[in-house]
Amino acid sequence: MSHTSRHVYFFGNGSADGTRDMKAVLGGKGANLAEMTNLGVPVPPGFTIDCGTCLEFLATGTRSEGLAEEVAGHVARLEAVTGRGFGDPRNPLLVSVRSGGPVSMPGMMETILNLGLNDRTVQGLAQQSGNARFAYDSYRRFLQMYGDVVLGVPSHDFEHLLMAKRLMTGAHNDAELDESTLRNLVEEYKSLIRNTTGREFPMEVQEQLWGAIEAVWKSWTLKKAVDYRRVNAISETLGTAVNIVAMVYGNMGEDSGTGVAFKRDPSTGERTFYGEFLVNAQGEDVVAGIRTPLHIDEMAQRLPGAYAELLRVQDLLERHFRDMQDLEFTVERGTLYLLQTRTGKRTAAAAIRIAGEMVAEGLISEREAILRVNASHLDQLLHPIIDPSAHAKPIATGLPASPGAAAGMAVFDPDVAEQRAAAGQAVILVRDETTPEDFHGIVAARAVLTSRGGMTSHAAVVARGMGKCAVVGCKDITVDVRNRHFTVNGTVISEGDWITLDGGTGRVFPGDLPTIPSEVVRVTGGQLSAAAAPLYQSFSRLLGWADASRRLRVRANADTPRDARIARGFGAEGIGLCRTEHMFFEGDRINAMREMIVARDEGGRRRALAKLLPMQRADFEAIFEAMNGFPVNIRLLDPPLHEFLPHGGEESKLLARQLKLTRQELMRIVEGLRETNPMLGHRGCRLGITYPEITEMQGRAIFEAAVRAKRRGIDVQVEIMIPLVASGKEFEHQRAILEECHSQVVLGMGEDINYQIGTMIELPRAALTAGEIAVSAEFFSFGTNDLTQTTLGLSRDDAGRFLPAYVERGIFPDDPFQVLDVTGVGKLIQMAVRDGRATRPTLKTGICGEHGGEPRSVAFCHSAGLDYVSCSPFRVPIARLAAAQAAANE
């Protein structure tokens, strides 16, 4: 299975074997280290083992042929460049071993620092540096990381020993532990490893190196990494590279340090230097949130030379990569080294602002700006905020790491968060700091609260990337994971107690506070505060570019005039699905509907329908008004009739009294309507064929409303959709009734109206016979929710019990009710479009399932040649951007 004769690529001394275009081979980290080296950026030398080698190892359990020799040759080259020897007790070369896949997965795979230390080389490091405390601090860090990652000794066992040393010495943090204490800690760590694993810690540096390399490869399959890839739709077939880099040390004293920096604020997008650093620390201390870091501005006073160099380098890298960069750096005795650069994770608000400003700065084009914003992340801009009228007092304030407001029950364990969320409970995950092992709990929680960590900690980065509300570094709270509570100024919040987080301000409140829509949502009602204006302007500008470049039109699924107005506010270009049955559940209408259902004959049904007609007509007229100049697609009655009736209890008693029936008579009617499989039963056009008077009433209501609206100067564009059609004859039967209604309304009201009649394709047979149906149908709207059910033989309501396991095991790449099944359902859609247009070249086609607001599904609709997608009003901006991205990627 040898994929290439070469496995290892070197970088150092101003030149590299790779470039940034080799991410598939070198991973993102390795490719960017090579690119920075070629640019002359100060990067420690090292080499990268390619991604394919990881996949080969995982598939076979053995290393690629010739790899050991290649690695040995590159270690020798690294020794030559650094002037140090790997395992040399007098002048030791130490390395970091880091993962790095083609797509960034922050914190999801493993890293080991200070590899090459043992009882002999630690003496050489102490001599070489003139700083024995630093040497033993590096050794205890290496023992902990290697013991955890490679040997399987739980990290918290090391932490307990470290905590005990801090308590014994009165040290506030690790940097205050002296050399003698660290020497003792090293011996305790080695004893812990011996007692846990049954063998000594490996002192042979080659054994250390290969143990670390294999651990990094295996970390591709860790649960946290698999979960991250599933949530972010990253392929399982990429593998990770391994980067082996000469160590530089941020823990050598007060003239050394480590940090993370961004050219722009990843939360807001503001063009301001943003980041955090720690003096006398190593990189993991910042990212893991072990110590709460200092703001990057303080680095200008503490390490002025390195700060000036960092400003120069970050400007160079942003101009070179033409995107906001996330930099990891170390300062060793005043000298700056870059350890990584990658495209920075950012909130949707920041992504939109950065893209717009980079266009204005001439760095990128409008097309590139459209592609820079993750369409699904626009949801973040629609996050709720705490209702200002809720006069609650915060119990604590931390760092506002990811915006939005969320309320839920406090939980202190990621497994508990997952279990409670699966049971339908709203939870907020509370931790001292999160680690990658907590990822599944973050996915399940509505928000995250940590007592430690900064704006670039694991919790902050992951929550921002997922659009979750997060408050981090909340120093006032003391988290007790074991007893499952946190305390703050005498207040105790136990597991199950409700709390509310404000991710925009960092405030923590007790209880379940009310929320209101975000500023971007409220602007649809004409309200826009001065503070929200820049965000809304950036939002509008980006969507303006998107609208100018997309081919697909975007409509909304809206059943009420209010929904229609919201949809227009978000830029919907019509209604793609108006479900008439939803109108029947309001107020007194349900009584008239029930009266129609229980009627013993056609006359009784018609009397009840006569009561419903003016109600439907008024609703349709208001929707036509809200959508003035845009098409409105009205679906005739679809659900089975039993859904409108109660199935027992007090409501049945009351209804029987209202309908002047005995309770037994009512229950007999209900039982008579009961079906074994109602989703495939007496519903859709089958109701209209059995009871044509229902179709007549709805047809009259639609046409009369259209004429009334037209008389008021409204540009009415009517589309009537016949649901659940399986054959052309069904469609023609219903069309004939509607056309007769149209003729009667024209005759009675003296005014004509333009209209189209089409069908909802939601059965495989309809897709297979699309050419026949298109003889009479003027449009097809693919109801992908039901078409997915009927194609895959899956019930939406029941499949949730096993679908997650299917996705987890790779049987389905995604939940087919969330992401369109392109291979199966998609093929039916393509066939129906092709055959339908062969019969009727002007056939209009679209989709109206919730897939219409899912970016990958929208891209498929673009490639399949559909005319429009339709989704819920709040997903319209997502669909607009996704449609533009599909066109840009074509």
Image: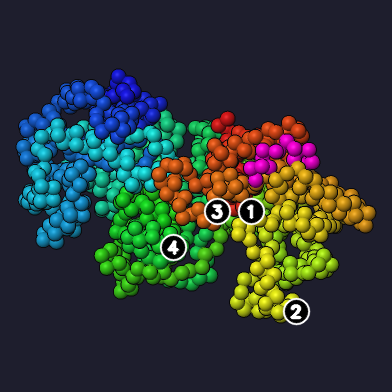
Q: Amino acid at mark 3?
A: Arg
Is 354 rendered above or below residue 79? below
Q: Residue at x 54, y 56 (%)?
A: 797
As drawn, is 860 to the left or to the right of 666?
A: left
Quadrant of the image occupied by residue 881: top right
Pointer 3: what residue?
796
Q: Residue at x 72, y 71 (%)?
A: 591
Pointer 1: residues within 10 angstroms few (<14), some, or many (20+)? some
Q: Earlier in the sequence, mark 1 or mark 2?
A: 2
Q: Earlier in the sequence, mark 2 or mark 3?
A: 2
In depth, the one of 287 and 731 nearer the eye is 731
In depth, the one of 330 and 284 nearer the eye is 284
The quadrant of the rendering that contains the N terminus is top left
Q: Amino acid at mark 2?
A: Lys
Distance, label 4 to label 2, CA atoms, is 41 Å
- Whether the residues at callouts 1 and 3 have beta carbons within 8 Å, the answer is no
Is 305 rendered above or below residue 406? above
Pointer 4: what residue?
423
| Residue 722 position in % (x across, y down) | 74, 50
Q: Secondary structure at mark 2?
A: loop
| Residue 278 position in % (x across, y down) | 26, 48
Is 9 rendered above or below residue 301? above
Pointer 1: what residue?
680
Q: Secondary structure at mark 4?
A: loop
In the rendered structure, which segment of residues is drawn in magenta? 763-778
Pointer 2: what residue?
660
Q: Earlier in the sequence, mark 1 or mark 3?
A: 1
| Residue 348 position in % (x across, y down) | 49, 47
In depth, the one of 524 and 252 nearer the eye is 524
